[in-house]
Amino acid sequence: MQDASMKDLTNKDALSEYVKTHIDEAISNGWIKVYYQPVVRSITGQLCSAESLARWIDPEVGFLAPDKFIGALEESGEIFKLDCYVVKQACRDIRDKLSKGLPAVPVSVNFSRLDFIMCDMLDVVEKAIAKYDIPRDYLHFEVTESMIAKDEDLMKDVIDRFRTRGYEIWMDDFGSGYSSLNLIKDYSFDLLKMDMAFLSNLAEKSKIILRSTVVMAKNLGIKTLCEGVETKEQVKFLKSIGCGKLQGYYYGKPQPLDDLMLSLSEKGITMEERQWRAYYEAATINVIDTDAPLQIIEYDGNTFHTLFINDAFKHQISVITEDNYELDKTIFSENSPLMSKFRQFANKAIRSKSNESFYFTDKGNYYLLKGMYLAENQDRYLFKTQITNISMDQNTTERDRLDFRLRELNNLYEVVLLMNISANTVYPLLGGYIYMTEEMNEFMTMKAVYTSFSSTFVYPDDQSDFLEFMNFETMRERLNKADKTYAQKAFRIKQADGCYQWRIISIMPIPGTAYNEFLYGISIIPDEIAHLLDNASYSNFNCSGTETDALIEEYARLWATLLNNSSHKLFWKDSNRRFRGVSKSFLEFYELESLDEVIGKTDEEMHWHVDDGPYQGDELDVIGKGKFVVNAPGQCIVNGVVHNIICNKMPIYDKGKIIGLVGSFADVDQEIYRVNKLLAPSKLDNMTRLMNSKFFLATMVDYAMQYNDAGKTYGFIMLHNANQKRIEDTYGSKFGVKVIREIGEKIIQVIGQKAVAARTKEAYFGVIIYIDSKKKLEQLTRDLVSNVESINRVDGKSVTIKCPAACLLRTDENVKDETIYQMTIDLLDKQEGIAPEENE
Ligand code: C2E
Ligand code: MG
Ligand code: MG
């Protein structure tokens, strides 16, 4: 370098000339440095990405900021050299972190318009990520509105191609010039970077623009970031309007990577791990600027943690603190009565993955909390919640009425449930879940709860009436017709002792919910009234009309047929557990000559069981408590041979009282033999819709036979997702299964009915096809690879699939039917075995 030119470099043109003539040298000599500026997620305060910004540190000229060289390089068309270098350097830096097992965040790289004219930027990027083996979601690319304005067609194509490949495209300096709104309409971006000019004076107008821009972006499903954040006030404002990411000197200037790491750890800023990205994005997109109370909370199965809460929410629960940590201590303290309600709510919402709600009272106020499940990762769950203080929002008389009703309910009802029609949920207000079996639980839908209640607890003859009574579609009409504010009806309900007693069921729509929420109560009836009801209901049945006679005759015939011909071994007993009758198959099983040998006897007297205890206990429960015995295993002895049996027993009722039991049993050994004969083993892989390896191998034999007998050539392809382990390390093995399933689908898409495919093991896939040329086979292999590698998102999470493949034709040299499988695998392994070169 000549000393003479040095002086001239203070002159702008001379500097520009110097830059243009020295760019190659600057790159090859390492004068170009990539600096990184931190980007922080506003709801967590964690580092979520970094922007790469170029610096030219010249041994002669000294430190050059981008404004000194970007313009010149754009003029000369050489900017692509710089940008290609930055892409590679960013990849190298990310690979370095990953290889050391350190956390890394995505890097956003700035592009210039000329990059796409002077070179194939997508190809450069794809080669770099392949070389450094980096998932695509570690790179984002920034383009500006002015780039687009200059060449709309080119940029549209560029943006689409990058995005379909799985890269995020960010719109830089949004709002700094040109017709920004049109751009968001016509192009797809993943994120808007709002220009720092808006922040430089946080006047009312700028605030309104930022606030509306964030709302607009969220409605369009676009993420938001604000640049140039320098002060605490700006941070607070941007958080309150729901801006997702923050970048600026407040968090750090652009600096060399090592300095950045050091300053982050000094500031106590931690890094968002890749597997948490989708989870916190889900939270971020739900933080909106609204007058309605809004809170975003996180639940770890035990405690809750507030990620965002707006003033309206705080107003409803009368707290003022600015500090979410303090706030959590108040709302979610272990001795707060709310804690268990919140947990119930959370567990329910996790199951239903939708809206859930609950009512609660606190210091004399009634609240309704509604919430929704948003996302989960590693046993942590996100919810969006909304709260209404009913006592605050409505006038006092409404509140008094509710209060009165609740107190009244307490005295009269055994059980009060809150039913929500649109959410299809049931919430117990009183009495918990008496009248609930083990299968019924708080997560069941409303309809499931009352249908299950009906079949388990309502007297069989009353069940259809009960379901009619519970029909919420006709409720409003029925109430209007009867001119009542609630509906009531008596039903016989099974009690703990197994007998049925009369209960009144009441349903009352809650005012102000537009027939969406109902109180459902069960209350006891005084004995005299119950007695009257008994007589009325049975006299009905006892009247001997001709219709009833015909019905009884029909039942009798059915029963006789079953007893004579069914293979089911049936029996019934009186309340003293003595046989009153058995079916023909029962007699045959025990090798008995006639009914007389068994009628009037108990099991013990027949000496049938290896151990009398269990069945005896079961039967006492059936007769005493109305229990149903389902599939109870046992052993019985017939002529010296022990048989394994399973038994079912149920009570027989007459007028609500248990008068005996009826049952059936099956010989397990016989059943297993029968079922085994019916069932053929499955051909399908348990993760995908492809074949499993066992059947795949069997199928290969068919192909081999066709080749030898009919001369039909076939080809064999093996594919492998080389990134499967990395994906499972990041997102867990459950997620890995989803990826495998997706790959299976992609393979099916390509081969259709033409070929057979299987998952042979782990993330390995095999395909066999009748095909007559190597060219065609190779083309099919490429099609398979590119379709599989086109997966870049599974279940909302970014993934990068790398799918090496190998193929062999039966007629290839040295290939035999017995060896084609192993040879293809060897070929694939050999391919994968080639280590990627570390450096250029
Ligand atoms: P940009 O992409 O909008 O980058 C943001 C610029 O704002 C950076 O300037 C950064 O240092 C600055 N900045 C960040 N936070 C604050 C803050 O809180 N206050 C203030 N006053 N400034 C802040 P820098 O690094 O000088 O870069 C300027 C521009 O040069 C960039 O604007 C980008 O358009 C361009 N550029 C930088 N590196 C590259 C590159 O590698 N390739 C291309 N094509 N362009 C680049
Ligand atoms: Mg930028
Ligand atoms: Mg910018």
Image (cartoon, grey):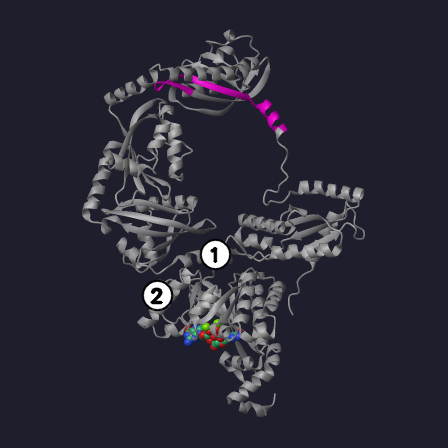
Secondary structure found at label 2 = helix
Using the rendered image of the protein, determine whether residue 166 is visible from the camera's viewpoint. Answer: no
Under mark 1, the amino acid is: Ala
Is disc 2 surrounded by few (<14), some (14 to 19) or many (20+) residues within 10 Å?
Answer: few
User: Residue 410, how many percent across, how many down?
Assistant: 25, 35
Q: Which residue is mark 1?
A: 278
Inspect the magenta stretch and tell me whether residue 657 lies in it: yes
Q: Which stretch did the figure color magenta?
A: 651-677
Front: mark 2 or 1: 1
Please tell me which residue is depicted at 58% across the width and 44% down the height of the picture.
687
The numbered mark, 2 or 1, whose residue comes first in the sequence reads 2
As drawn, the residue found furthest toward the bottom would be 4
Quarter containing the C terminus: bottom right
Q: Nearer the viewer, residue 489 or 70?
A: 489
Residue 591 falls left or right of residue 651: right
Secondary structure found at label 1 = helix
Residue 608 falls left or right of residue 487: right
Distance of mark 2 from mark 1, alpha carbons? 24 Å
Rendered position, 468 above or below 825: above
Q: Which residue is mark 2?
A: 236
Inspect the magenta stretch and tell me whether residue 773 lies in it: no
Under mark 2, the amino acid is: Lys
User: Residue 154, how many percent across, how many down?
Assistant: 55, 71
Is disc 1 surrounded by few (<14), some (14 to 19) or many (20+) residues within 10 Å?
Answer: some
Q: Mark 1 near ligand 2 (CB under 8 Å)? A: no
Rendered position, 583 above or below 145: above
Rendered position, 137 above or below 486: below
User: Residue 515, how many percent across, how many down?
Assistant: 30, 42
